[in-house]
Image (cartoon, rainbow, N blue to C red):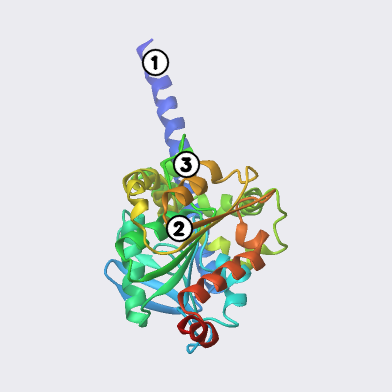
Amino acid sequence: MPRKRSSLVHKIVRIISMILIAVAATLAILALITQAGVLLLERAYPARGRMIEVAGGAVHVVDTGPRDAAGPPVVLIHGASSNLESMRQPLGARLAEKHRVILVDRPGHGWSTRARIGDSTPDIQGRMIEQALEKLGIDRAVFVVHSWAGALGARMALDYPRRVAGLVMLAPVAYPWPGGVGQYNKIISTPVIGPLLAHTITLPLGYLLAEPGARGVFLPQIMPDGFVRDSATPLLLRPREFIANAQDLVTLKEAVREQAPRYADITAPVVVISGDGADKTVSTSIHSRPIAAAEPNAKQIVLPDVGHMVQHAAPELVVAEIAAMIGRIAPGPAAAAQRSQ
C-alpha cells in the first residue's frame, strides 16, 4: 500500500511539473511574441516630433503651425489609452492653419517616457509638461484637454496660472465618481502580476480587442474608418505604456478628490464642451456641469446626442471656440483700436 501511494504521489508531481513547464513555455513564447510585436509597432508608428528631457523623463511634442501667429499657441493634450495622434487628426491640422500648435504625448504615453511608473497623477505630469513648454520657449498658451487630461488641465491652471492663458475642456474628468476604473487596470497596476501579464498576453489579446473597444468610446457616433490605425492606438499595447495607462486610471480618482476643492481658484477663462447623457465613458453630470459651475470664468456647451469623442463629433465647433478664446486673449489690431477709442 505505501508503494502504491508513493507511486500516485510521483504521478501527481510529474503531472504538475509538466503543467508548470507547459505554462512557462507558453509564457515564454508569448513574451517573445510581445517583444517582436513592440518592435513592429514602433517601426510602424515612429516618433514624429521632438523629445524634450525633463525631470523624471522625456516629453515627446509635435510643434506645428506658424510660429508668428497672433495670440498664444494651442497645446493639445490627449486622454487615457491614447497619444497625441488622437488630438492631431480632428483638431491639430485644422488649428495649425492659423495658430502655432503643440501636440503632447503625456508622460508614459506615445513616445514620452517617465522614469517612475508611479508618476501617474495630474500634478506630476503637469509639472513635466510645464518644464517641456518652458524649454520650447512657450510662455502662455491655450490648453485643450480631453477626458483624463481634463484633470491635468485643471491642475496646470491651478499650479501654473501664468502658463495657462485659457482652458478648453473636452468631456473632462474632474471629480471623484462612483465605482472604479475596471478590474483589469487594478490587476495590471499590481506589482509582479501586472508586468507579467503586460509582457505576455496584453499585446496579442489587445490586437483582438482594440477595434471594438475604440468603437465603444465613440458611441453613439460611428468611429471613423481606420481610426485605430491612423491614431497609432496600438502603441498602447506595449507593456510599459499599458502599465502606465493602468496606473494613471487607478490613481486618478484620489487625485481629483484632492484638487477639486480648489477649482474656484482657476483664473483663466474656461470652456467646457461635452455630450449629454449619451457619453457613457465620462458622465457630464458628474464632471462637466460641476466644474463649469465651480469655475468663475467658465462657459459650458452641452451637445445633444454626442458621446465621449467630442473632438471628432464636433471638430468645427471646438476649433471655433478655441479661436474665439484666442481672440479674446489677444485680439487683432482692429479690435484693439476699437477698444482704445
The residue carrying mark 1 is: 5
Residue farthest along the bottom direction in this orientation: 68
Q: Marks 2 and 1, how far apart in space?
A: 62 Å
Query: What residue do we see at 47% from left, 54% from top?
Result: 148
Q: Which residue is mark 2?
A: 149
Please provide percent x and percent y for residue 332: 52, 84
Given the image, on which type of amino acid does mark 2 rest? Answer: Ala
Mark 3 and mark 1: span between their CA atoms? Answer: 49 Å
Query: Which residue is pictured at 50% across the width and 80% down the height?
Result: 331
* SS category of the residue bearing label 1: helix
Q: Is 330 positioned to the left or the right of 319 in the image?
A: left
- Judge by depth and name the residue closer to the eye, 341 or 229: 341
Circle on res. 181: 3
In the rendered image, residue 330, in percent from the top left (x then y), is placed at: 47, 79
Identified at 61% across, 57% down, the residue is 310
- The kind of secondary structure element at disc 3 is loop
